[in-house]
Image (cartoon, rainbow, N blue to C red):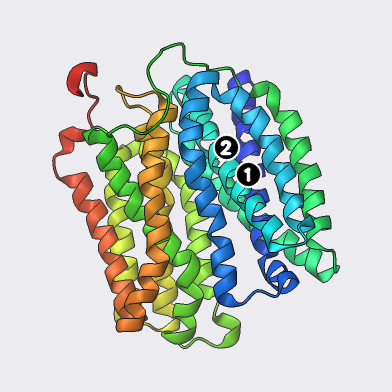
């Protein structure tokens, strides 16, 4: 195995560690709710701490990666992220839990920007698309973390003990991988904080990522509810839609790199939009158990490529350093992830879930149009094209 291949394995392990930490936290949310005797509304308020932390981390990530290089940021924040996990389990009051979750969200998003910056650099060195495979490993870690969490629950191990074990596993992964994380400090004085107006390319990519993340957030939170209330699935099949979506998204990310290499990034985004539109349309028009499962499967394949391909395009901006470009696109797209699930609930209250999912189907059509109109936006722009 040559050096670049070893770097790819090491970075893949880091993405896996990130997904393992996040999914381990998510697997024990019901236990956290029971521990603090939280109502559904109170739990929802507590869960907002993660996106708040993520938003706080965006400008810090863009500045710190540009100023010190992604290697320094990754090595510091990876340990901080892993150490924050058991603190969640050790919290004894909600007043302790809230700042810890904010830190967990902040460290997670800083790592997200830093790791993607490293992955883009390796992608350039290898001369082929590999970013989506890293995101696929993150998704695989989601399944692993959920299964491991279920085992911890069966063994009656507390969240603190569970999270402590994940922290130790994370330390091993980071220590074994750290020598392959390169120093990529940007010597330019440009960049820094991300409070800048995106150029046409980043704005377009940000909107595409926004629609993709909105769809992804809705599918995460509402797939089970849709199968229960609209599909009227048997109790044992309520999770089928979610499993189909997640399985397709995870496997689709491992196919994205070959697809982008063969057909190009923009055509892949265009097809992704069509898959999202058709998948949700099938689920709304024919809400049977098999047709809805097929529809959710198509949506999973459609969503799979949106974020890795969008990040790949953004990271090659000629006007901004990769860390700043990624933070700009991430900022725009993250609002979609926050806006989507509440929007589904609001529309469902006024009409029903079928209308909500029909509206989300329009996201796929929007992605298709954004990648089909004024295609020159996606071509590299000269340095002096932005004020």
Instruction: Residue under label 2, please give it.
Output: 111
- Relative placement, left or right, of 373 versus 195 is left
In this figure, what is the number of numbered marks? 2
Q: Residues within 10 Å of mark 2 (few under 14, many from 20)?
A: many
Based on the displayed image, in which of its 4 quarters is residue 44 positioned?
bottom right
Q: In this view, does 39 lie above or below 326?
A: below
Q: 249 or 333, which lies in front? A: 333
Q: Earlier in the sequence, mark 2 or mark 1?
A: 1
Please name which of the two marks, 2 or 1, marks the residue nearer to the observer. Answer: 2
Q: Marks 2/1: CA distance?
A: 8 Å
User: Whole-percent x and y of residue 47?
Assistant: 57, 62
Quadrant holding the C terminus = top left
Tell me if residue 302 can be seen.
no
The local secondary structure at tag 2 comes to helix
> What residue sits right under mark 1 in the picture?
18
Q: How crowded is mark 1: few (under 14 residues within 10 Å), some or many (20 or more)?
A: many
- The correct choice, above or below, for 311 with respect to 363 in the image is above
CB under 8 Å between discs 2 and 1: yes
Q: Quadrant of the N terminus?
A: top right
| Tag shown at residue 367 | none
Residue appearing at x 58%, y 45% in the figure: 137
Image quarter of residue 69: top right
Q: Can I make out residue 222 in this image?
A: yes
Residue 46, given in percent of the width and then of the height, sits at 59, 63
Identity of the residue drawn at 37% across and 37% down: 328
**Image location of residue 244, percent across then percent down:** 50, 67
Q: Residue furthest front?
A: 95
Residue at x 53% of width, y 60% of height: 48
**Left or right, residue 35 beside residue 208:** right
For mark 1, give the secondary structure: helix
């Amino acid at each position: 195995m040559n050096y670049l291949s070893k770097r790819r394995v090491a970075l893949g392990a880091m993405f896996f560690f990130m997904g393992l930490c996040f999914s381990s936290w998510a697997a024990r949310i019901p236990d956290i709710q029971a521990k603090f005797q939280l109502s559904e509304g109170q739990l929802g308020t507590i869960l907002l701490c993660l996106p708040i932390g993520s938003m706080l981390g965006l400008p810090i990530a863009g500045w710190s990666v540009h100023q010190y290089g992604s290697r320094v940021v990754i090595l510091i924040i990876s340990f901080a992220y892993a150490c924050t996990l058991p603190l969640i389990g050790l919290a004894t009051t909600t007043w302790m839990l809230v700042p810890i979750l904010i830190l967990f969200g902040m460290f997670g998003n800083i790592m997200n920007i830093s790791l993607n910056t490293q992955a883009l650099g390796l992608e350039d060195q290898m001369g082929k698309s590999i970013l989506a495979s890293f995101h696929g490993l993150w998704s695989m870690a989601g399944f692993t973390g959920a299964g491991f969490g279920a085992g911890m629950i069966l063994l009656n191990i507390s969240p603190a003990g569970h999270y402590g074990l994940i922290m130790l596993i994370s330390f091993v992964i980071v220590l074994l991988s750290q020598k392959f994380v390169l120093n990529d400090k940007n010597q330019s004085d440009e960049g820094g904080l991300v409070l800048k107006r995106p150029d046409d390319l980043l704005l377009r990519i940000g909107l595409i990522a926004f629609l993709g993340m909105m769809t992804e957030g809705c599918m995460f939170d509402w797939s089970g509810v849709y199968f229960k209330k609209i599909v009227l699935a048997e109790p044992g099949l309520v999770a089928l839609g979610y499993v189909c979506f997640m399985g397709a998204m995870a496997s689709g990310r491992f196919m994205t790199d070959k697809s982008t290499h063969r057909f190009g990034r923009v055509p892949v985004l265009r097809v992704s939009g069509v898959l999202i539109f058709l998948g949700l349309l099938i689920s709304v028009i024919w809400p049977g158990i098999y047709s809805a499962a097929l529809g959710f499967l198509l949506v999973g394949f459609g969503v799979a490529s949106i974020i890795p391909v969008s990040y790949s395009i953004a990271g090659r901006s000629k006007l901004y350093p990769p860390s700043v470009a990624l933070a700009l696109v991430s900022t725009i797209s993250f609002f979609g992830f926050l806006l989507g699930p509440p929007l589904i609930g609001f529309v469902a209250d006024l009409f029903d879930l079928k209308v909500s999912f029909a509206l989300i189907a329009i996201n796929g059509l929007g992605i298709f149009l954004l990648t089909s109109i004024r295609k020159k936006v996606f071509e590299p722009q000269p340095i002096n094209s932005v004020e």
